[in-house]
């Protein structure tokens, strides 16, 4: 029994000093802003690279590079999406500690991470909150920056993949 308790991580208590919470909260908000800025900066460089790759006579190599760049950056985009949601949950947890409650949501509630409106990381939302989260009951998903980025990355990924395959087919 004693061995089991030693393997558990120690409980970490937030300090009761409001200045410490304020510093942590401000750091979380700055980090969220940095992650969002990185997402859109990466998108800008990606679109510029796409234009450069497709600006001259496309070939098998260029379509392959476009496919690999798109696939890699989409993975980075998804990771940044998870990170942003985690940081937002931590900042809401501090807000709860301060007694600042928005929409009467429970402590440390993650927004779901989605791809094309399909939840890939549910978080801790109830069915009632899920209805509020979605853009109408009949649409079933919310129009967000993430949805737009999903569409952009997937379309370019499909375009690059199809053209890579077409470049392999001998022309008559």
Image (cartoon, rainbow, N blue to C red):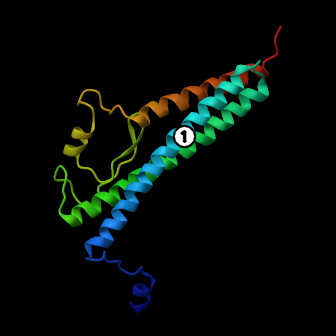
Q: In x, y percent, where is residue 10?
A: 39, 81
**Outermost residue, bottom side:** 2
Query: Could you tell me which residue is drawn at 82 percent across and 16 percent down?
Result: 170
Q: Nearer the viewer, residue 134 or 29?
A: 29
> 131 or 102, which lies in front?
102
Q: Vertically, is 168 above or below 125? A: above
Q: In the picture shown, does residue 171 fall above or below 156?
A: above
Residue 160 lies in what quarter of the image? top right
Residue 166 in the image: x percent, y percent?
Answer: 73, 19
Residue located beneath label 1 in the image:
41
- Residue 15 occupies which quadrant of the picture? bottom left
Q: Residue at x 29, y 55 (%)?
A: 109
Question: Outermost residue, top direction?
Answer: 172
Q: Quadrant of the N terminus?
A: bottom left
Residue 25, relative to residue 161: is it above or below? below
Residue at 32% in and 33% down = 142
Q: How many marks?
A: 1
Q: Residues within 10 Å of mark 1 (few under 14, many from 20)?
A: few
Q: Is residue 55 left or right of residue 24?
A: right
Quarter containing the C terminus: top right
Q: Is 130 situated above or below 104?
A: above
Closer-to-camera residue (82/91): 91
Work out whether residue 92 or residue 170 is closer to the camera in this orientation and state it: 92
Q: Circle 1 sits in a helix, a strand or a loop, which is it?
A: helix
Q: State the image coordinates of residue 158 (x, y, percent, origin top left).
A: 60, 26
> Residue at position x 41%, y 80% from top?
8
């Amino acid at each position: 029994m004693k061995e089991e308790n030693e393997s558990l991580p120690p409980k970490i208590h937030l300090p009761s000093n409001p200045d410490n919470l304020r510093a942590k909260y401000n750091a979380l908000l700055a980090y969220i802003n940095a992650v969002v800025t990185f997402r859109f900066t990466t998108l800008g460089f990606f679109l510029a690279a796409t234009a450069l790759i497709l600006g001259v006579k496309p070939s098998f190599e260029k379509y392959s590079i476009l496919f690999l760049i798109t696939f890699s950056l989409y993975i980075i985009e998804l990771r940044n999406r998870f990170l942003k949601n985690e940081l937002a949950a931590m900042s809401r947890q501090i807000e709860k500690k301060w007694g600042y409650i928005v929409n009467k949501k429970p402590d440390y509630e993650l927004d779901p991470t989605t791809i094309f409106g399909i939840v890939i990381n549910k978080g801790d939302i109830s069915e009632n909150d899920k209805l509020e989260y979605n853009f109408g009951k009949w649409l079933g998903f919310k129009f967000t920056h993430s949805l737009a980025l999903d569409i952009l990355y997937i379309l370019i990924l499909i375009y690059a993949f199809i053209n890579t395959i077409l470049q392999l087919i001998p022309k008559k």
